[in-house]
Image (cartoon, helix red, strand yellow):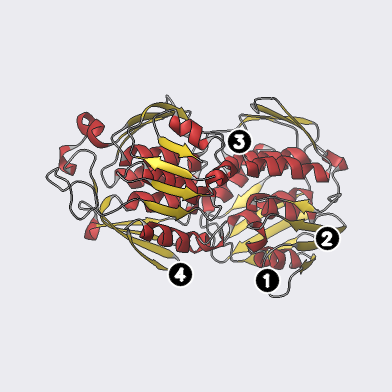
Amino acid sequence: MNCITAQSSLSGSISVPGSKSHTIRACLLAALAEGTSYIRNPLPSADCLSASRCIKEIGAQVEMTDDNSLWTVHGAGKNVHLPSNVVDVGNSGSVLYFLTPIAATFSGWSIFTGDESIRTRPVGHLAQALQQLGATTHISRPDVDAPPLLVQGPITAGKVVTDGCLSQYISGMMMAASRIQGTLEIELTDPKEVPYLDMTKMWLESLGIPVQMSSDYKHIVVGGPHSIPAFDRTIPSDWEAVAFPLVAALLTDSCITIQHIDGSGSQGDEAIVAVLQSVGACIDWNKEKEELVVYGGSHAQKHFSATHGVAGRLSTEHLPDKTLRINCSGFPDAVPALSVAACFIEGTTIIEDIGVCRKKETDRIEVMKSELTKLGACVEDGPDYLIIHGHSPLTADGNPNPEFTLHGGVVESYDDHRVAMSLAVLGLALKEPVTVKDAECCAVSFPDFFQVMKGIGAGFSLN
């Protein structure tokens, strides 16, 4: 399915789905729990449905309401067991990295695989970490650091030293520690995506599992074993999904309200609000009402600070060295959306410490440079950074900017949901259409993305 965009103005209210990161953690922990857990407002995306399917292999049972507003998980508890079949995680890296350490707590072999994209995702760091705890691992294809991955347990308590460049397998080991007799110590030499480690710590502690984590995230201690109680939780809204309507409104002549915003601080991607406000974005975040109001173009006028210049114009001119520097190590999934926004910001944007983005569904550094360049953007890349030399459509005196040369075209999604949504959002701000190929992949994290966005005026047509 291709998505063809048209220049749009957005208005009205929108709700984004529940958090993918919270939903998958809830599924895994509910599977290990004694008794019946209730997960309210889960994200019924492809990745989360993979989680709900895979936990059945270790003995859990899952029931879903017709509208997916409630998932009931009958935990395996003391009867949890070695996966009864090959575990196919679909497209979900989170399920792969979370469930593999849990499976390694059992005696016997577990086999993990997934779709074409998962079969390119690195697993060497995970395998080496589990080996330090006594597991035997085997990556099935010589010279290919990717699933299928075979793991034989059981692992035992001890110390693991690893770089932590992917937070997901660290979270998986923290969850697995609840099944290990003794103390698991994890030493991270270069921790990344640390807000997700905080999220896992929060979940475990809320279920009675003590976690010690140093302020620099380099030392994590989890004691076990602990029986996990059943729970009843409501999944908060997904900040990773908030980025797309937020950026869409800022780049167009729009005013939208994004409802049910998570203000708990448990999701690192909320940092995008402050990042965009630093270049003049007009965003009101009312934490009491749990909503963001986003003003783009002329709608920013009555809320706009005159010291920033033209309403709706984004610029780095008030920043040090007139450069926007974004360290995205804590929220790398925002890189595609921020890359798009940077193309409309007058000045240079440097998105750095994002080497992990080369290990996601695609090499997002390479992909965003390639596809944005096709549309006229000026982008440089390096091992762990992107540099975007952007231009606002408006000059400092409010006239059309002749240096703004972004144009329409045909771009590839590479079957990466965040790439697809980011490029579709970009197209809403251009006079010429943008065609995003293979856009159905958006369902991985934001089911009904196109329909929801069309409800507030987005000019998306699908064929």
Question: Which of the 4 image quarters holds residue 248?
Answer: top left
Badge 3 amino acid: Leu
Q: Which residue: 36% across, 41% down?
A: 428
Residue 360's place in the image compared with 74, above or below, is below
Where residue 69 appears, as percent x and y from the top left, is 64, 26
Instruction: Name the element at disc 2.
Output: strand
Contact flag, marks 1 and 4 (Cβ < 8 Å): no
> First in sequence: mark 3 or mark 4?
3
The residue wearing badge 1 is: 144
Question: Of marks 3 and 1, which one's residue comes earlier in the chain?
Answer: 3
Residue at the (54%, 44%) spot, across then down = 1
**Structural distance between the alpha carbons of marks 3 and 1:** 32 Å
Q: CA distance from mark 2 to mark 4?
A: 35 Å
Q: Is residue 81 left or right of residue 218?
A: right
Q: In the structure shown, which secondary structural element does the residue marked by tag 4 occupy? A: loop
Q: Considering depth in this image, is 46 or 266 the residue closer to the camera?
A: 46
Name the kind of residue labelled 4 in the image: Pro
Return the residue at label 4: 383
Q: Which residue position holds label 3?
A: 43
Amino acid beneath label 2: Gly
Residue 393 is situated, as x and y percent measured from the top left of the image, at 23, 47
Residue 149 in the image: state x and y as whole percent: 75, 63
Give the mark nearest the N terminus, 2 or 4. 2
The amino acid sitting under disc 1 is Val
**Structural crowding at the residue carrying mark 1, measured as other residues with C-alpha within 10 Å and reported as few (<14), some (14–19) or many (≥20):** some
- Which is more toward the observer, 358 or 411? 411
Disc on the earlier residue, 1 or 4: 1
Residue at mark 2? 153
**Observer able to see residue 157:** yes
